[in-house]
Amino acid sequence: MDIMYIVYLVLALSLGIFLGWLIFRHILNGKYLYKIKKAELEAEAIRKNKMQEIKDKFFAMKADLERQITQRSNKVQSYENKVKQREMQLNQKQDELQRKKNELEIIRENLEAQLEIIDKKKQELDKQHRKEVERLEALSGLSAEEAKERLVESLKEEAKTDAASYINEIMDEAKMTANKEAKRIVVQSIQRVATETAIENAISVFHIDSDEIKGRIIGREGRNIRALEAATGVEIIVDDTPEAIVLSAFDPVRREIARLALHQLVSDGRIHPARIEEVVAKVRKQIEEEIIETGKRTTIDLGVHGLHPELVRMIGRMKYRSSYGQNLLQHARETANLCAVMASELGLNPKKARRAGLLHDIGKVPDDEPELPHALLGMKLAEKYKEKPDICNAIGAHHDEIEMQTLLAPIVQVCDAISGARPGARREIVEAYIKRLNDLEQLALSYPGVIKTYAIQAGRELRVIVGAEKVDDKNTEQLSAEIAKRIQDEMTYPGQVKITVIRETRAVSYAK
């Protein structure tokens, strides 16, 4: 009984396990089938999407290709139209050329016919000329060459007589007007304008004892330097330059005010915006007083009286202005003295000449800067302050901006050039100076027979060495004059240039 129970229990368990296994396998097969079905559906959807993308790309590429084909067709059509147009133009030009060719052919034929007629007429004229010459020779008993020589001799004698008479008349007239002509020639011979230069002072350097003062000048967040720039109108450059501050401004009076104000502020030690404005106002007043005092002292020294106070102030402002590195006040004083000396030599009024020479550059120092040349501006200022017309004309004409009306004008022009052109008066740019010397030497070297050239004395003398076998003594003078004339015509230079031509013969032998 127990064995049978166990057998039945084993069979029941086996049957249950088998049935469970069947059920599990059924369930597992169902899941696999579901997954397979789902995967098939997804694959079908992916396939449809890919097919749709391929179709879209195909249609897009097709449209793009059609568009490109259309564009190329348009370009080809445009090129064809241009080619047709050019072909038409070429045909028209060819027709025009053919027409002109035919016209030229007709003209050439006409010219040939006319030339034949002219040749025939020339031959006839030659025959007639020979007959006339033979007839004249028979009548005169002289040949054509002998008659020509006699005619030339008679004309030479007549020309010599007329020339001698003409020279005597000119000499007599020159003796009568010698004094007047001498004055004119002296003035015109020294009218030369000084060479152009390009150096103008636009900065001043303020030296300090140590770089620690730079921080005090700048101030907290730069308030001190801003206040100083606003009060003076000068750009203050504080950089790495040791123990120096750069003051930059086009107006030299402003730079001088800024320099003196900085000097007082650094010496006092109190540097703040209120103190800066106070010191700048005080220095500006001192500078204005010094300008007026300088102008008065200059006019007294030169003996120029009765000037308007504003003109006196402008003369004082010249002290703080430089022109091409030359102090403007010193230049004006020098020009005034030169004008007085030259006017005295020419028998003119030296006081007027000195006055015009002193005032000739006041157009460089006005309070405002109008767009006018300084000579014209100076003339307008002189007219404004009631200077006489000959003084105003001399001021306005010293750079040929207006026509000279009196002898005073060329005197001022000449003395201005002499003061600016003397050695050491003004600075030149080094490159321009070297180029001028090279041009001088190359100009002389261009003449045949010249071996070497040397520009000496800062370009104021040119020594030319020529070969003794190529140039004789007589030709040296002519060569010197030709070089001088060419330098005057082709070059710009201060003062005058002396040309010395040297010709020497050397005989060298050796004792053995």
Image (spheres, rainbow, N blue to C red):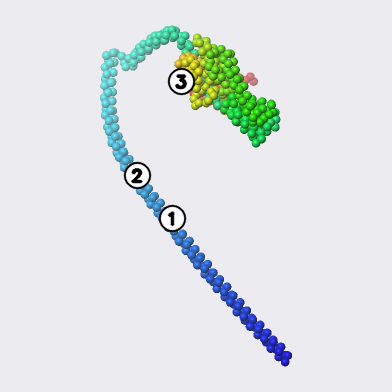
| Mark 3 crowd level (few <14, some 14–19, many ≥20, 10 Å Cα) | some
State which tag comes first along the sequence, 2 or 1: 1
What residue sits right under mark 1 in the picture?
Answer: 68
Identify residue type, mark 3.
Ile
Residue 455 location in percent, x, y?
57, 22
Q: Secondary structure at mark 1?
A: helix
Regarding residue 197, the answer to whether it shows in the image is yes
Mark 1 vs mark 3: in front: 3
Question: What is the count of numbered marks?
Answer: 3
Q: Find disc 2 in the rendering and name its residue.
A: 89
Which mark is on residue 429?
A: none
Residue 496 visible, this orientation? no
How far apart in space, not on screen, are marks 3 and 2 (Cα)?
58 Å
Quadrant showing the N terminus: bottom right
Residue at image position (63%, 19%) is: 511
User: Extreme right residue here?
Assistant: 2
Query: Residue 78 versus residue 346: which sits nearer the camera?
Result: 346
Q: Is residue 34 left or right of residue 169?
A: right
Q: Secondary structure at mark 2?
A: helix
Q: Nearer the viewer, residue 126 or 497?
A: 497
Q: Quadrant of the C terminus?
A: top right
Mark 2–mark 1 Cα distance, whole angstroms, equals 31 Å
Q: Nearer the viewer, mark 2 or mark 1?
A: 1
Give coordinates of residue 115: x percent, y percent.
29, 30
* Residue type highlighted by circle 1: Gln
Q: Which residue is mark 3?
A: 402
Q: Is residue 278 left or right of residue 129?
A: right
